Amino acid sequence: MSIKAQPGHMNFTHFVKMSALLLWQAVHEVLTNSPKKVQLDRKQSATVQHLVNVLRQWEDEELEVEESIVVDRIEDEEEDPDYDPLINSSARYAIPTDPDNPAMCRIGDQLVDVDLVQQAVDYYGSFGDAQHIGKARPSWNTVNKKFPFIKKERHLRTLADFERNGLSINLHNAIKWVSGKLYEKVEHHLEQGHILHDRDLRSMAMEIVAVNNLDIRFKASDSWIASWKKAHRITSRKITKFVSRKRFVDAAVIQKKSEECVKHVQSLMKGYKNDEVYNADQSGFVCEMHTMRTLARTGSKDVHVVVRSESNMKKSYTVMPLVNADGGFAPKMFVVLKEPNGKFPAKGIFPTHNLIVKAYSTHMMTKDLMLEFFQDCVFDPRMPRNMLLLVDSWSSWKDSAAIESVKPRTRKLKTVLIPPGCTGMIQPLDVGVFGQFKRIIKIMNAYAQRNHPDFHLSVRDNTLKVISLVFWQLSHPSLKEWVKQAWYSSGYITQHPLKYDTPTNLLFPLDVAQKCQIQPCCRPSFIICLYCTKKICFHHFIEEYHNCS
């Protein structure tokens, strides 16, 4: 995949115009120290050297393979003329509405809104049922005055039919229409270079249903999405990426140190309750986060995606949350923003209820910032008075005298350092928390890029809104078992967590795209708040900072 920015672009895909056999011959000459027979230019030589490095790293067991899924157009295939959008949906046939306007009903030569037709049916039927029991039905003149689209007397028979059989949208026509509208949207986003996933297709389909007031029983299931992609020449293709990881110590040594650290911590945990055992870790978040996978046209040889700024993909901020072994988050999360001269503007920053935000000349933590972290987050009045804190091997954590200097007399704190190289195996935040945290922000960024192009997550106040809201949702009690899983997977607790769903699935379920439930908003919702359980649009959740409790 390549990332395309405005202006300019970064292309991570390098194509070399030489046959695979010739390329392999050049690689073989280097690996075997054979006399060079293949003549290469500078770019070809660089490619050969890259392949040699990959093979040598593989030989030294310093290479791992990552695979990702992208969606692409199938350039040389026709759309499936026999595709039925009703396939793999829960739809059933009903009274026909117009194929091209599924929310409209045809009365004679007119298209009339289904809701308005239903009002006419209700009015006509209120004088008696279809068998003319009770009051006499109103005359055509009476009905016509109230509902002008009933232009002829025979249209009264249509109302009687609808009364007898019920009036509802034809799901086949409606879903066919949704399918076409979805294709228009997807084509637009692919042309614009936006990142798309199956989750986004599902969201867009349900938004089309909600925005157009289609009262139909339909969910864009995984199987429906799969059939839709196949019919419209949209495919998921796998990209294999080789990632070099330099090992400074032998893997067996890392494993041994990890096991020893876990056993040591487990012995110490016997003197604490689980909600008194915390892990703290800092993580760098780039200001414009994107997934490295997307949907695209099948057969595309190069996939470009648009980002607002290349610099935003390099500019970062640091977050440092605290999670405990009972599945809870600390009330406050520490955030460091890179600011000119290390200071915030005179007007201040957006106020949040759960972040401690500091400015510095870089986004990197320093010892002084670490001490502020202890003062404002670790020794927050709502935190336990006796704590066991698990941290990585960052040198500043080792300065126990400095930490002691800011510790209140009424507090007790014991710090355990995770050995270098072991954090990916036994640090709970790394093992099971940061991945979901970043994934949610990526989903929000992709949604904003498609639907709210004027909202930039890299703007300071917007950044603070997003990370505050995501942190607040992750702190919801319903996610305690998910946090416990990180401690369980790291080895510190032995009781398996109860069954849980991930934050991403809870916040962005299959049916999330409905009408926003913040009255009187009519925008499509994109997220569910775990606190009030309302489905909320992007504007009211993020731009208006939905801080409910």
Image (cartoon, helix red, strand yellow):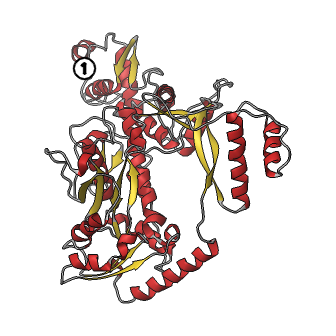
Residue 312 coordinates in the image, percent (x, y): 38, 41
Residue 246 position within the rendered picture, expressed as x and y whole percent measured from the top left: 60, 61
The residue closer to the viewer here, 313 or 214, is 313
How far across and how far down the image is residue 423, in percent? 49, 69
Name the one closer to the observer, 221 or 403.
403
Q: Amino acid at mark 1?
A: Pro
Q: How many residues crowd around disc 1 within 10 Å: few (fewer than 14), some, or many (20 or more)?
A: some
For image coordinates 38% across by 22% down, the residue present is: 104
Q: Quadrant of residue 140?
A: top left
**Extreme residue in the left direction:** 347
Left or right of 18 on screen, residue 430: left
* Residue 455 vertical placement versus 357 (above, below): above
- The answer to which of 112 and 313 lies nearer the viewer is 313
Q: Is residue 377 above or below residue 346?
A: below
Q: Is residue 220 above or below residue 476?
A: above
Q: Tell me where residue 390 appears, x and y as whole percent.
A: 39, 75
Residue 298 located left or right of residue 363: right
Residue designated by label 1: 138
